[in-house]
Image (spheres, rainbow, N blue to C red):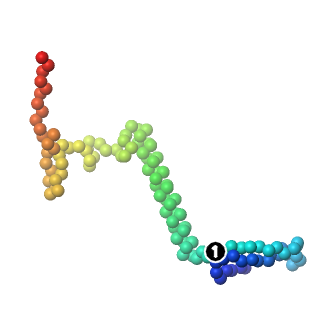
Amino acid sequence: KASAVASGTAQVIATLRTPAGAEVGPPVLLRIRITQFGTAALLITMVAAAVLVLAALVRLARRARAARRARRGGPAGGPPDEHGPHAPTGEHEQPDGHSRPDEAAAAPVEPAERAR
């Protein structure tokens, strides 16, 4: 078992041995780059990767849902109808919570002049 005390590069001489302990071939010099990844850094990296994958899956699900709505002929943003929360009512809500009729909806409609 090998362990590192600090980051950096190290040189190691490695030999290959048989189960009986006899050397197979000459020793080889290996240059090893050592990085220090602690448990906390590894955990943070794994959580960030999981959040990224989850966000991608949510986005794919929303795109698939929007594509299904578009195929059915509905709007891509959602299925607002005449009874939905943002349906046009001819009224505007005031800051005090009361609503007043829309001026355009409340204005009387005058008949068009007849062509002569």
Q: Residue at x 48, y 51 (%)?
A: 60
- Figure check: 115 above or below 17: above
Q: Residue at x 34, y 44 (%)?
A: 79
Circle 1 is placed at which residue position?
35
Mark 1, secondary structure of its residue: loop
Relative to the observer, which residue lies in front, 31 or 109?
31
Q: Residues within 10 Å of mark 1 (few under 14, many from 20)?
A: few
The amino acid on which the numbered mark 1 sits, given as a three-letter code, is Thr
**Whole-percent x and y of residue 102?**
16, 44
Q: Residue at x 42, y 45 (%)?
A: 66
Q: Left or right of 62: which side holds 89?
A: left
- Figure check: 92 above or below 55: above
- Picture quarter with the C terminus: top left
**Whole-percent x and y of residue 82?**
26, 42
**Whole-percent x and y of residue 31?**
74, 73
Q: Left or right of 106: which side holds 86?
A: right
Residue 35: name its quadrant. bottom right
**Whole-percent x and y of residue 16?**
83, 73
Relative to the observer, which residue lies in front, 85 or 104?
104
Q: Residue at x 88, y 76 (%)?
A: 23
